[in-house]
Image (cartoon, rainbow, N blue to C red):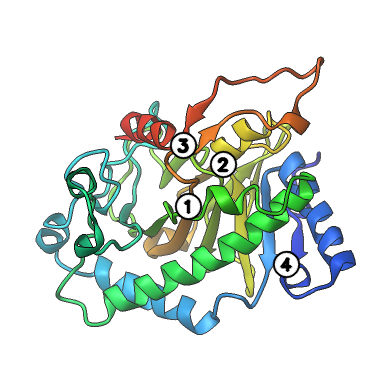
Amino acid sequence: MSGNLVEIPIIEFDRFSKGNTESQNIVADQIYDACHKIGFMYLKSNKISSTLIAQVFGQSQLFFNLPLPIKNRLSWSDEFSNRGYVAVEREKLNIHRPGDLKEAFNIGKEVDRNQLTTQKEQANLILNQWPTELTGFRETMLEFYQACSEFVQTLCQAFALALKLPDNFFTSNHNQQEHTLRLLHYPPLKESSKPGQIRAGEHSDYGSFTLLFQDEVGGLEVCTVNEEWVAAPSIPGTIVVNTGDLMQRWTNHVFCSTKHRVIIPNDDRINLSRYSIAFFCHPNNDTQISCIESCQDINHPPLYSPISAGDYLISRLQASY
């Protein structure tokens, strides 16, 4: 593979969600090719409203503009909660680099405490944290979370078709909405960074796949199979999608979980804030991730022991924080 942008394909995903069987098979084959060769793709789709996406970016900017003491009151209580505010340099996606030059805010599915029926459910309940200073923030984020969750279910069907699996293989393992919506802000750099420090260290994502929405500032880079870094800039009307670690384990490396990073610009963009929105699609926590039968044979035995999706996520969060 040569290091150029054409390696990350642009796929007309609405041909799957709105098309006939022939169109769906074509899109599924394109998805298979992208996930097998590079693990990244751009999906063109109108399924998530551009107006809603713009509203989320606007609310995200308002949140990160809040005074630091207010944001710190919403910080994660521990590395397992995966909810709330993460300050600049707290997260280290590459443990061999200094802390990342970014701040984040994580949101999970909204749970009504009154709907829980057992003491165990009450004890294990993790609640979202919401900034009361921002009007409409909670409502906008929950609307977007639901829109992404619905998009994920359609994409799960496409992944199943791409791998010649039953239609409901992935949808039935993602129907509890154990996903994470993450708002990201990469502040302007007013001081020199530490040696080796970048905006987000090279890493692979933890779950099944990720939906990424990004602004025009840029900086995202993807590592090819030849270990060349290629830019993955914002393309209007598209969503960046990449496969994660659990999908790689499920498919025995038929689909790859690709390293990526966010670099510090070497031009005037160093003085700009960069914003992005990631929706991490995660299987139900009790799903056992074991090698799919069709992805193994005598020459390609399973590369990993089975693990629950929830346990894998906790292990990765511990390493990053």
Q: Which mark is residue 13?
A: 4
Q: Position of residue 187 (x, y in %)?
A: 33, 59
Residue marked by disc 3: 309
Image quadrant holding the C terminus, namely top left
Q: Earlier in the sequence, mark 1 or mark 3?
A: 1
Q: Kindly report the distance in space between the C-alpha atoms of the residues bearing marks 1 and 2.
A: 9 Å
- In space, the residues marked 1 and 3 are separated at their CA atoms by 13 Å
Say left or right for 63 vs 287.
left
Amino acid at circle 1: Phe
The image's mark for residue 244 is 2
Q: Nearer the viewer, residue 77 or 267?
A: 77
- Per the model, the C-alpha gap separating discs 3 and 4 is 27 Å
Q: Looking at this view, is 269 or 51 the one in front?
A: 51
- The answer to which of marks 1 and 2 sits earlier in the sequence is 2
- The local crowd at label 2, few if under 14, some if 14 to 19, many if 20 or more residues have their Cα within 10 Å, is many
Dot 4: element: loop
Mark 4 / mark 1, whichever is N-terminal: 4
**What residue would you read off at disc 1?**
280
**Quick check: can you spot residue 215?**
no
Q: Neighbour class for label 1 at 10 Å: few (<14), some, many (≥20)? A: many
Residue 144 horizontal side relative to residue 66, left or right: right
Of pointers 2 and 3, the one earlier in the residue sequence: 2
Residue at 66% from the left image edge and 73% from the top image edge: 45
Looking at the image, do the residues carrying marks 2 and 4 touch, with CB atoms under 8 Å apart?
no
Alpha carbon of mark 4 to alpha carbon of mark 1: how far?
19 Å
Q: Residue at x 53, y 38 (%)?
A: 204
Helix, strand or loop at mark 2: loop
Cα separation, mark 2 vs mark 4, equals 19 Å
